Amino acid sequence: MNVEEKENKVEEISNSEEKTNLIKMPSQEFIPVKEENSKKIFFTFKLSVIIIFIIFLILFLILTGYNILNTNIISGVYIKGYNVSHLSKSDARYQLDNYFKDNLPEEITLKHGDFETTVSLSQIGASFDTKLAADSAYRVGRQGNIFQNNLYILSAMFGKVNIEPMLIIDKDQLSKNLEDISTQLPDTVIQSSYYIEDSNLIITSGKEGNVVDIDATTELIKNSIYDFSDNNIVEIAVKTQQPDSIDVEKIHNEIYKEPVDAYYTREPFSVFPSENGVDFNISIEDAKSIITSEQKDEYIIPLKILSPKVTTNMIGTEAFPDLLSNYSTKYAVSNRNRTTNLILASNKINGTVIMPGETFSYNKVVGARTIAAGYKEAPIYVSGEVVDGVGGGICQITTTLYNAVVYANLEIVQRTNHQFVPSYAPASRDATVVYGSIDFQFKNNRNYPIKLVCSVANGTANFKIFGMRQENDCEVQINSYETGRSKTAIYSEAYKILKKDGKVVSQELLSRDTYKRH
């Protein structure tokens, strides 16, 4: 480098330093100005913070005062979507009750396949606890300290607080309803059962099926109610169940019955009828063997009837102190077959005791009139003609009994007249029977049992009815007469007249009858 170049270099360096000095100088001169601005900014920030704090404090005090002075539910509180803001607890309950009343259905429909039934909400006591819900709504913003309460108030004011009310249901009643519904399902489980037919116990096997799952269905019903479902239809939850095994010992205990002897008391007079007993006619072990030996739909266990030592019909007439009625008819002793039939029928009825409210059936008591039962062939009416038939003549016993029953002022349930007017009774004073089709029935409408005493001897068939007289008993009179005749028919009527102290109390039409003419 030459001298000239060196001088130029020195000059450049000198100029550079000078420029540097020129730059630094202004910076050094403005330092005090920056410090002054920072103080102003800091002061402004402090002032802003103080103002904000004061505003916050004022708001805090306002909210605190509002919360203290407010006696209603705060703003922004809902119960199951219903706005209860600014309401008192009592007003909230009142409005909620009406709201739920309008929105809850009267019943829930339960379905299982094609099966459909309903459950009444009122029956199962379904309702929302509006009192508890209103109390919960009122406690919003009042449960914590001052800061927490104010935070809740602000949160509810700018947001929304929704309270879900508690659903109340009578679970015991609902369970009972569902148990009943379970038995109605078309595919329900079939439990084993039994019944008595003649002298046999018939046990039927059970079958697998569905039953209502009570817990699961209860939850489905509660959810449907809680959600205000529009269709109100719930699919029943079911579960498969096997039938209970056949319990032979339990069945034996249920059907076994000791015979009960009849007896009566004098003070007060009361008759206690006899009752037949029943038991297995084989041992319980043998009965179990029948059940377990083979899988069948039906099992038969033979039974035996245990007869009482003293039947009701054995009770003497001393238990029936008063003669209520007495009626007789005449028959021809010379007709032995017919007489035999009269005696057989009367023996079946003789001594029969009929309890208050009980209905007597002639065909049930006398039974079928067959050769095996001892009945003989005697003249009977068939299709308007007189022919010989088994049991001919027993309608005279029916007629005699009918008149005795009317004179005792008992209730006639069923009575039919003959085709022709019989020789042993006037028109409209007779009663015919045909086993299996025509019966004679009457009811003991008195307060005390009655006893039928029948005899057939020496050409007279007689019925006496014994019991105990009552204060309202009346004298009975029967009036019967023909009301007209045609070439082929006879028409007649009969009336029952009740008298008290010689005065007519009532008159009742017993029957209007039509007979064929011979």
Image: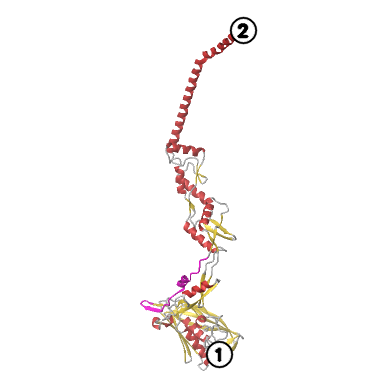
Spot occupied by residue 329 in the image (x, y as percentages of width and height): 49, 88
Residue at the left extreme, as displayed = 267
Q: What segment is highlighted magenta in the picture?
A: 243-269
Count how many numbered circles sit on residues in the image: 2
The amino acid type, in three-letter code, at marker 2 is Lys
What is the quadrant of the N terminus in the image?
top right
First reached walking from the N terminus: tag 2 or tag 1: 2
Spot occupied by residue 313 in the image (x, y as percentages of width and height): 43, 82
Q: Name the residue under label 2.
A: 6
Marks 2/1: CA–CA distance: 177 Å
Q: Mark 1 points at which residue?
A: 378
Vertical comparison of 50 with 367: above or below? above
Residue at the top extreme, as displayed = 3
Spot occupied by residue 50 in the image (x, y as percentages of width and height): 45, 27
Q: Can residue 503 be seen in this view?
A: no
> Is residue 131 magenta-colored?
no
Q: Nearer the viewer, residue 349 or 374?
A: 374
Q: Callout 1: 10 Å neighbours few (<14), some, many (20+)?
A: many
Q: Nearer the viewer, residue 261 or 62?
A: 261
The amino acid type, in three-letter code, at marker 1 is Ala
Q: Is mark 1 on a helix, strand or loop?
A: strand
Q: Callout 2: 10 Å neighbours few (<14), some, many (20+)?
A: few
Vertical comparison of 196 with 218: above or below? below
**In the picture provided, is 233 more to the left or to the right than 57?**
right
Identify the colour scheme used: secondary structure
Vertical comparison of 201 with 92: above or below? below
